[in-house]
Image: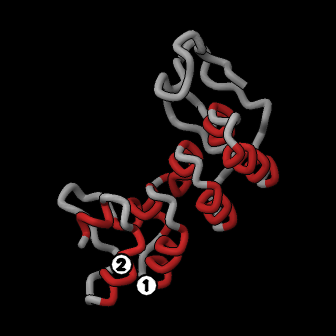
């Protein structure tokens, strides 16, 4: 069943726990169950795991808000922000914030909502990325380097 959860069936978390498995379970690579649920943006599964002994800290620094933003999971973004995620916490190498990530997908309505959420939670629209460091080629045009507000 864990393999099916990893393949996107985060709704199976409820059955997984009902069968007696721990909310803090990890796969063979050490990736926690809560990370898979967050990856697929299933807020109800994340909430259920938290109610059964898991911690948001398992998601890593800033509860992986950047990942939720990148995937356009606005409900998960809202949940993480309401539970202490920092709208201004930068990625260590590029100084890129969740707002930078949200702006890359701003042509989609979910990202517009995420941008509004981040701004409502204090995201700084004037924060620059690290000069001379490419800010995630998977998200940006290769010509964009450094100081991308």
- Where's residue 122, x and y in %? 79, 49
The quarter of the rendered structure image containing the N terminus is bottom left
Left of 130 or right of it: where is 41? left
For the residue pair 135 and 132, the one nearer the viewer reads as 135
Report the residue that reaches farthest toward the top.
143
- Please tell me how crowded label 2 is: few (under 14), some (14-19), or many (20+) other residues with Cα within 10 Å: many
Query: Which numbered dot is residue 23?
Result: 2
- Residue contact at pointers 2 and 1, CB within 8 angstroms: yes
Task: Decide which of tag 2 and tag 1 comes sooner along the chain.
Answer: 2
For the residue pair 41 and 122, the one nearer the viewer reads as 41
Secondary structure at numbered mark 2: loop
- Where's residue 66, x and y in %? 55, 45
Left of 9 or right of it: where is 85? right
Secondary structure at numbered mark 1: loop
For the residue pair 79 and 86, the one nearer the viewer reads as 79
Residue at 36% x, 75% y: name it.
Answer: 12
- Where's residue 37, x and y in %? 43, 64
Quarter assignment of residue 115: top right
Quarter assignment of residue 126: top right
Number of disc labels: 2
Residue at 33% x, 74% y: name it.
Answer: 24
- Please tell me how crowded label 1 is: few (under 14), some (14-19), or many (20+) other residues with Cα within 10 Å: few
Query: Which numbered dot is residue 102?
Result: none
Give the residue number, with chain letter if any, for mark 1: 52
- The correct choice, above or below, for 99 with respect to 28 in the image is above
Residue at 50% x, 26% y: name it.
Answer: 136
Report the residue that reaches farthest toward the left.
28
Calculate the distance from the C-alpha at mark 2 to the C-alpha at mark 1: 6 Å
Residue at 33% x, 84% y: name it.
Answer: 15
Left of 81 or right of it: where is 64? left
């Amino acid at each position: 069943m864990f393999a099916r959860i990893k393949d996107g069936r985060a709704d199976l978390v409820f059955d997984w726990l009902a069968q007696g498995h721990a909310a803090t379970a990890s796969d063979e690579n050490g990736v926690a169950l809560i990370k898979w649920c967050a990856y697929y943006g299933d807020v109800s599964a994340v909430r259920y795991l938290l109610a059964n002994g898991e911690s948001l800290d398992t998601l890593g620094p800033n509860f992986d808000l950047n990942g939720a933003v990148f995937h356009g999971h606005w409900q998960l973004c809202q949940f993480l922000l309401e539970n202490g995620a920092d709208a201004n916490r930068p990625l260590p190498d590029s100084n890129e914030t969740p707002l930078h990530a949200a702006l890359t997908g701003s042509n989609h309505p979910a990202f517009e909502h995420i941008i509004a959420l981040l701004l409502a939670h204090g995201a700084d629209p004037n924060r620059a990325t690290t000069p001379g460091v490419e800010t995630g080629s998977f998200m940006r045009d290769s010509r964009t380097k450094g100081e991308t507000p």
